[in-house]
Amino acid sequence: MMSLQVVSEDRELLQEVADFLLDEHLIANALISGEAIYKINEGDKITDTGVYHLKAISKSLLFRKINHKLREKYAERTPLLYSEPIILIDPIQTEYLLKWLAKV
């Protein structure tokens, strides 16, 4: 299992991504946070940008499929996408989440 992380300056894009991935059964749930500050080093200066954060639970084996589908659908608008492993999760919750996800 993984925690899928999606970051974008466009909150509406993240809502669309969440709906798309839920419809495709590629994520079991979605949480979109309020605006946060994203800092990046651009070589000669550090810049701040307001971004939103989508978190979702999925199967680790679905990451490549998710990435491919988002690249196909959004092309240059594809948000920053990465995953973090879920080390422990309640077994009953795991069973509940797995029944909503695509088979691998």
Image (spheres, rainbow, N blue to C red):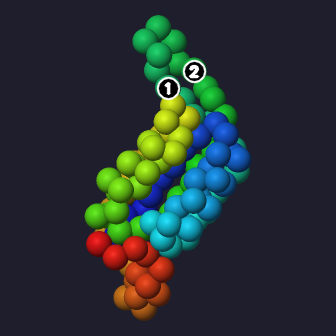
- Which quarter of the rendering shows the C terminus? bottom left
Q: Residue at x 46, y 20 (%)?
A: 41
Q: Residue at x 40, y 88 (%)?
A: 95
Which residue appears farthest toward the top when viewing the image?
Answer: 44
Residue at the location (50% across, 26% down)? 40
**In the rendered structure, which disc, 2 or 1, sits on the residue that comes first in sequence?**
1
Q: Nearer the viewer, residue 100 or 82?
A: 100
Residue occupying the point 41% across, 81% down: 98
Disc 2 packing (10 Å; few <14; some 14–19; many ≥20)? few
Task: Name the residue at the front extreme.
Answer: 72
Q: Is residue 98 above or below residue 13?
A: below
Disc 1 residue type (three-letter):
Ile
Q: Residue 60: horizontal and vertical position, in percent? A: 31, 64
Q: Nearer the viewer, residue 99 or 31?
A: 99
Q: Is residue 39 above or below residue 15?
A: above
- Residue in the foreground of this view, choosing between 85 and 74: 74
Whether residues under marks 2 and 1 lie with C-beta atoms below 8 angstroms apart, the answer is yes
* Residue at the disc numbered 1: 40
Q: Name the residue carrying label 2.
A: 47
Horizontally, residue 104 falls left or right of residue 53, namely left
**Residue 1 at what x, y percent from top left?**
34, 70
Which kind of residue does numbered mark 2 sit on? Thr
Q: CA distance from mark 2 to mark 1?
A: 6 Å
Whether residue 90 is visible here, answered yes or no, is no
- Residue 53: image location, x then y, percent: 59, 49
Callout 2: SS: strand
